[in-house]
């Protein structure tokens, strides 16, 4: 399926998911994948497809919830375990963004608490999310145990390692060799996540995003989806 066709199909599903919520509340949708999988672009384009259908959307990213360097690199600057375990303040991510959107929440959220580009905390603006909104959150590690039950629907973008690393190299001017020492922290940290959390087994939808022009759904668990929690195992 061509990219626009898939995005339109997913937008229709998410519009139906939001409409089915009783009582009315925001729908939380994760777009997960390794670095270079294409998460931000996919989520942005999905949000545009939703808006074209008249749906209220709200975009956020786990990237707004990084830890500062003293926490991120406390296990060493090249530690894969540190990348997986210490990159994000998941407590703040849940408390400030996800939990207020759960049943009974006040829908008052912030999109970020830390600017990783400037390496400084931010004073976040509090926003009230519309009760009918589809909330699209992109980022790595979104099927970790601390987060997996938060999603009403989740997408995992599956991309071979050599493709994702090459995309990161083109974007960030890094080494395109997955085995380069400078890539060890990120490649092995993501492999640790894949082995530990099995996101392809937990996601509602697994999308092969190797060909950006023609992504395709390879696993579809939507028939068992979920206002009550994700499939696990």
Image (cartoon, helix red, strand yellow):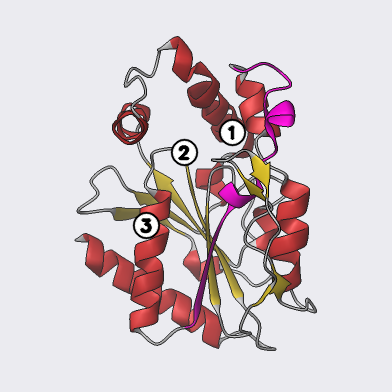
**Does residue 103 lie above or below 229 as drawn?**
below
Q: Residue 34 carries which label?
A: 2
Q: Residue 101 location in percent, x, y?
A: 70, 72
Q: How crowded is mark 2: few (under 14 residues within 10 Å), some or many (20 or more)?
A: many
The kind of secondary structure element at disc 2 is loop
Cα separation, mark 3 vs mark 2, equals 13 Å
- The residue positioned 58% from the left and 30% from the top of the image is 195
- The residue positioned 59% from the left and 33% from the top of the image is 193
Q: Quadrant of residue 51?
A: bottom left
Cα separation, mark 3 vs mark 1, equals 21 Å
Left/right placement of residue 183 relative to residue 82 reads left
Q: Is there CB contact under 8 Å for labels 1 and 2?
A: yes
| Residue that label 1 marks | 193
Residue 55 shown in magenta: no
Residue 59 shown in magenta: yes
**Does residue 55 lie above or below 90 as drawn?**
below
- The residue positioned 70% from the left and 54% from the top of the image is 93
Left/right placement of residue 184 relative to residue 193 reads left
Q: Which mark is residue 42?
A: 3
The kind of secondary structure element at disc 1 is helix
**Does residue 7 lie above or below 130 as drawn?**
above
Instruction: Work out whether residue 1 can be spotted.
Output: no
Earlier in the chain: of badge 1 and badge 2, it is 2
**Does residue 53 lie above or below 163 as drawn?**
below
Q: In which quarter of the image is residue 75?
A: top right
Q: Nearer the viewer, residue 195 or 81?
A: 81
- Magenta-colored span: 56-77
Q: Is there CB contact under 8 Å for labels 3 and 2?
A: no
């Amino acid at each position: 399926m061509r990219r626009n066709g898939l995005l339109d199909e997913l937008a229709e599903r998410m519009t139906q998911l939001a409409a089915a919520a009783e009582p009315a509340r925001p729908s939380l949708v994760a777009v997960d994948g390794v670095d270079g999988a294409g998460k931000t672009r996919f989520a942005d384009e999905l949000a545009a497809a939703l808006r074209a259908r008249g749906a209220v959307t709200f975009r956020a990213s786990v990237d707004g919830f990084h830890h500062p360097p003293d926490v991120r690199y406390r296990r060493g600057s090249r530690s894969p375990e540190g990348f997986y375990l210490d990159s994000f303040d998941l407590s703040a991510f849940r408390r400030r963004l996800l939990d207020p959107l759960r049943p009974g929440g006040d829908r008052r959220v912030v999109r970020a608490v830390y600017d990783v580009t400037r390496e400084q905390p931010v004073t976040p603006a509090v926003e009230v999310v519309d009760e009918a909104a589809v909330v699209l959150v992109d980022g790595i590690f979104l099927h970790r145990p601390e987060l997996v039950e938060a999603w009403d629907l989740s997408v995992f973008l599956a991309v071979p390692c050599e493709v994702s690393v090459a995309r990161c190299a083109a974007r960030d001017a890094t080494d395109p060799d997955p085995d380069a020492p400078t890539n060890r922290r990120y490649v092995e940290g993501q492999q640790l996540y894949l082995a530990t959390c099995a996101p392809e087994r937990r996601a509602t939808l697994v999308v092969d995003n190797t060909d950006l022009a023609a992504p395709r759904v390879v696993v579809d668990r939507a028939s068992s989806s979920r206002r009550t929690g994700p499939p696990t195992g």
